[in-house]
């Protein structure tokens, strides 16, 4: 009896289960509760518009159907309309924070194109003088006996004996003693001047009553004896340069200036010079001249800076650190880290007013250290990405966006040349 009851109960349960399954199938077919439960996922999937599908590991090609990636063993992922708008790419605020994206504003600033250079001290050739004799004679005594000696203005350099000056001086003295006319005496004086006899020597002859043939050569300026071309007892001829004196009141600091900086310099630009070996010693100067010659090896030009040296503390051969003040101008500048240099192009990532990001070609100008001038491609007030732009590149497929800006969309090539997963060829 119990066994028969168990069999009857099992049959009844099977009949009830079959009836329930039949009723459930009818309700699904008529759009019953099961159909209503399935509707929300479909509506949710249609709420966001899909632009295309892509392989997240190879984001360049675009596909118009979902399926398996032909490059990787993974499914294609959709790119929605709210993720990419036009040429820009939107990145969620949470993603921006996690990527550490930092932006900066392009601003116009008054920038001085000052730069640093290294210059070597040289004599100012315009201050040099030559000491010569205008008459044949002999050097009786040499007061300065070695080159590079410092001399003062009026300091004795050498004593020269000139026998050719004796005859015209004796003639002048004879005319004066004889009481000759004023015209004859003046003519005799003119002859002495023509022979370059110093007026001081003529006065000494008149005071002593006899001709003077020894005279002293003195330094016309203060400086250094750059050349010494005579010795004691040497015979000298008219026009022979016995000494060459280099002035030290001002010196030249000669520096190699790159072409890009030299074109912005004007004569008279101010410079601050500091001794390389002693930073406490500073001097003021100005740009004297840029030599019209380019060094083909370094592509630089030589610039001469005139530096004040009245104290005489600078000598030729010293190295100076020069801070050259260039002209100030208004320039549009951005942080140097905002530039993305590809080798053939220079890009920045611009944050648009709707919060999306787009790449933009720019033309960089002068390098200002931690800032760079932008001569074209940006406007004053544009917001650029200063940190995290390479992560945006990976996240938002910068290359494909840049290609679309150049009228070379990859989607057309992908849809025709690439096989599609999920029903693809």
Image (spheres, rainbow, N blue to C red):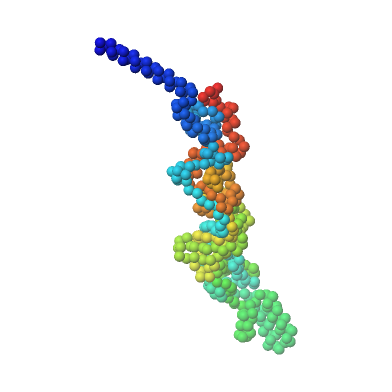
Along the horizontal axis of the image, is 372 left or right of 73? right
- State which quadrant residue 23 falls in: top left
Q: Residue at 73%, 86% (x, y): give it.
A: 182
Where the C terminus falls, by quadrant? top right
Q: Residue at 55%, 29% (x, y): give it.
A: 64
Please name whichever residue, 240 or 376, is drawn nearer the observer in this view of the structure: 376
Q: Is residue 300 visible?
A: no
Please name whichever residue, 174 or 149, is drawn nearer the observer in this view of the structure: 149
Q: How many marks?
A: 0
Image coordinates for residue 97, horizontal then vertical, percent? 45, 45
Q: Is residue 28 visible?
A: yes
Q: Is residue 55 above or below residue 88?
A: above
- State which quadrant residue 62 falls in: top right
Please name whichever residue, 391 or 267, is drawn nearer the observer in this view of the structure: 391
Image coordinates for residue 268, horizontal then vertical, percent? 60, 64
Along the horizontal axis of the image, is 97 left or right of 232? left
Where the N terminus falls, by quadrant? top left
Q: Is residue 393 above or below residue 165?
A: above
Q: Among all residues in the image, which is located at the extreme left?
A: 2
Image coordinates for residue 365, horizontal then vertical, percent? 58, 51
- State which quadrant residue 343 falls in: top right
Q: Is residue 147 above or below residue 66?
A: below
Q: Residue at 70%, 88% (x, y): give it.
A: 178
Image coordinates for residue 57, horizontal then vertical, percent? 48, 33
Q: Residue at 53%, 52% (x, y): give it.
A: 105
């Amino acid at each position: 009896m119990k066994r028969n009851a168990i069999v009857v109960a099992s049959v009844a349960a099977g009949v009830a289960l079959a009836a329930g399954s039949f009723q459930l199938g009818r309700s699904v077919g008529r759009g019953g509760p099961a159909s209503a439960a399935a509707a929300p996922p479909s509506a949710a999937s249609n709420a966001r518009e899909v632009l295309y599908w892509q392989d997240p590991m190879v984001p360049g090609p675009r596909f118009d159907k979902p399926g398996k990636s032909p490059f990787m063993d993974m499914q294609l992922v959709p790119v929605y309309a709210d993720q990419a708008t036009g040429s820009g790419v939107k990145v969620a605020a949470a993603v921006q924070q996690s990527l550490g994206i930092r932006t900066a504003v392009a601003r116009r600033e008054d920038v001085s194109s000052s730069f640093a250079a290294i210059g070597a001290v040289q004599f100012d050739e315009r201050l040099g003088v030559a000491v010569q004799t205008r008459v044949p004679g002999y050097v009786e005594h040499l007061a300065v006996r070695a080159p590079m000696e410092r001399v003062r203005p009026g300091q004795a350099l050498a004593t020269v004996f000139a026998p050719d000056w004796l005859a015209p001086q004796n003639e002048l003295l004879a005319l004066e003693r004889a009481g000759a006319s004023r015209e004859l005496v003046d003519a005799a004086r003119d002859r002495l001047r023509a022979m370059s006899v110093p007026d001081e020597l003529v006065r000494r002859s008149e005071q002593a009553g006899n001709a003077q043939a020894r005279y002293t050569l003195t330094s016309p300026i203060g400086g250094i004896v750059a050349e010494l071309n005579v010795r004691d007892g040497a015979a000298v001829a008219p026009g022979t340069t016995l000494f060459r004196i280099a002035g030290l009141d001002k010196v030249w600091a000669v520096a190699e200036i790159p072409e890009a900086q030299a074109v912005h310099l004007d004569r008279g630009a101010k410079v601050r010079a500091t001794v390389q070996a002693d930073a406490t010693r500073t001097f003021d100067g100005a740009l004297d001249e840029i030599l019209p010659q380019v060094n083909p090896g370094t592509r630089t030009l030589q610039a001469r800076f005139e530096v004040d040296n009245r104290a005489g503390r600078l000598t030729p051969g010293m190295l100076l650190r020069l801070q050259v003040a260039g002209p100030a101008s208004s320039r549009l500048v951005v942080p140097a880290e905002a530039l993305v240099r590809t080798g053939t192009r220079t890009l920045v990532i611009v944050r648009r007013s709707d919060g999306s990001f787009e790449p933009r070609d720019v033309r960089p100008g002068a390098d200002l250290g931690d800032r760079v001038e932008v001569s074209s491609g940006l406007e004053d007030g544009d917001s650029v990405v200063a940190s995290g732009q390479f992560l945006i590149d990976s996240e938002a497929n910068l290359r494909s966006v840049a290609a679309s800006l150049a009228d070379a969309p990859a989607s057309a090539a992908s849809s025709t040349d690439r096989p599609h997963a999920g029903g693809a060829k």
